[in-house]
C-alpha cells in the first residue's frame, strides 16, 4: 500500500506511511475478530510482541516528531528506508522456504526464557520498522514467528501476527496523525475500496498456489523497492 501511494499517486512518504498505518489498524481489527473466533490467535505471543513493539514505536515516533517527517529532506530519507525495508521483505518472501529450512537445521529449540526474550526483541524491531515505513508486520513478522515457533500451525502464526499488528499500527497511526502525516479522506477511500478488493482477492487466493503467489508478491516488492531506492 505505502509504495503504491508514493510511486503511483505521488503522496509524501510520511503521509503514505501514516495513512496506511491507520488503514491497516482498521482492516487488521476485522481480521483479528475472525481469527479470534476461530481460536487461531496465541494471545501470550501477542503480549510478548506488543511489550517490545509498543514502547519501541512510541520512542521512534517521538524521534520522528523531533526531527520532522514532512519536509523535502525527510522524503528522501523515508524513501531510502522504505525501499530498504521492501527489499528485505521481498527476500524474506521469495526465500521463505529456504530460510525456514536453514533455521530448522541451525536453531535448536530455545528455552522458554530465551524464547520469551526473543519474542520481545522481535516486537521491538517490528515496532521501529512499522513506525517508520509501515512495512514489517506482515511477511517479516510471520517469517520470524515461524522460525521462533515452528511447532505452531501456520494459521495460528498468521492470526497471531495479525492480532499483534492491531495495537502496533493503531499507536503508530495515531502518532503519525498527531504529527500531521495522515490523510483521513484518503484513508476512507482506501477502506471503501478494500471491501470489494478483499472479496475478489480471497476468491483468487483460494484458486492459486503458494508457489505462484509467493514469487509474484516478492517480485512486486522488489520492483517497488528498486524504484524507491533509485527515485
Image (cartoon, rainbow, N blue to C red):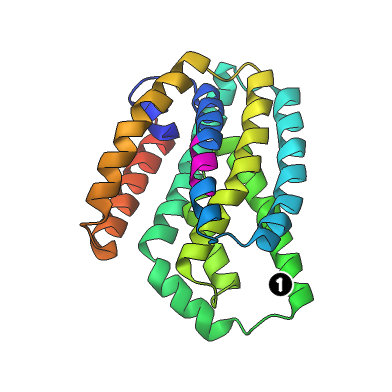
| Residue 149 x %, y % | 58, 72
Task: Please give the residue where the numbered disc 1 appears in the rendered image.
Answer: 115
The residue shown at (55%, 32%) is: 78
Where is 107 relative to 94, above or below?
below
> In the image shown, does 62 or 161 lie closer to the viewer?
161
| Residue 43 x %, y % | 66, 59
Magenta stretch contains residue 25: no
In which image quadrant can residue 168 be found?
Answer: top right
Quadrant of the image containing the N terminus = top left
Task: Please give left or right for residue 214 compared with residue 130 in the image.
Answer: left
The residue shown at (69%, 80%) is: 110
Where is 174 relative to 211, above or below?
above
Tell me the SS state at disc 1: helix
> In the image shown, does 29 or 132 lie closer to the viewer?
29
The residue shown at (40%, 53%) is: 90
Task: Please give left or right for residue 149 compared with residue 118 in the image.
Answer: left
- Magenta part of the chain: 27-32
Task: Please give left or right for residue 107 compared with residue 57 in the image.
Answer: left
Prevalent SS, magenta region: helix
Q: Residue furthest front?
A: 37
Task: Please give left or right for residue 168 compared with residue 29 in the image.
Answer: right
| Residue 190 x %, y % | 40, 25
Amino acid at each position: 500500500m505505502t509504495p503504491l501511494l508514493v510511486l503511483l499517486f505521488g503522496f509524501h512518504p510520511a503521509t503514505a506511511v501514516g495513512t496506511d498505518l491507520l488503514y491497516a489498524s482498521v482492516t487488521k481489527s476485522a481480521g483479528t475478530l475472525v481469527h479470534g473466533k476461530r481460536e487461531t490467535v496465541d494471545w501470550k505471543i501477542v503480549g510478548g510482541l506488543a511489550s517490545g513493539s509498543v514502547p519501541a514505536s512510541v520512542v521512534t515516533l517521538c524521534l520522528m516528531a523531533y526531527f520532522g517527517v514532512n519536509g523535502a529532506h525527510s522524503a528522501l530519507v523515508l524513501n531510502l528506508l522504505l525501499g530498504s525495508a521492501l527489499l528485505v521483505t521481498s527476500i524474506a518472501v521469495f526465500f521463505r522456504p529456504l530460510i525456514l529450512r536453514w533455521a530448522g537445521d541451525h536453531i535448536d529449540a530455545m528455552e522458554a526464557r530465551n524464547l520469551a526474550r526473543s519474542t520481545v526483541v522481535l516486537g521491538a524491531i517490528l515496532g521501529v520498522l512499522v513506525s517508520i515505513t509501515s512495512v514489517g508486520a506482515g511477511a517479516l513478522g510471520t517469517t520470524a514467528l515461524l522460525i521462533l515457533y515452528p511447532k505452531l500451525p501456520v494459521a495460528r502464526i498468521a492470526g497471531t501476527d495479525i492480532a499483534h499488528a492491531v495495537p502496533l499500527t493503531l499507536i503508530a497511526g495515531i502518532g503519525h496523525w498527531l504529527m500531521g502525516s495522515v490523510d483521513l479522506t484518503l484513508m476512507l477511500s482506501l477502506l471503501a475500496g478494500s471491501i470489494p478488493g478483499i472479496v475478489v482477492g480471497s476468491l483468487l487466493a483460494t484458486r492459486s498456489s503458494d508457489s505462484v503467489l509467493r514469487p509474484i508478491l516478492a517480485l512486486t516488492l522488489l520492483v517497488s523497492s528498486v524504484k524507491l531506492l533509485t527515485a
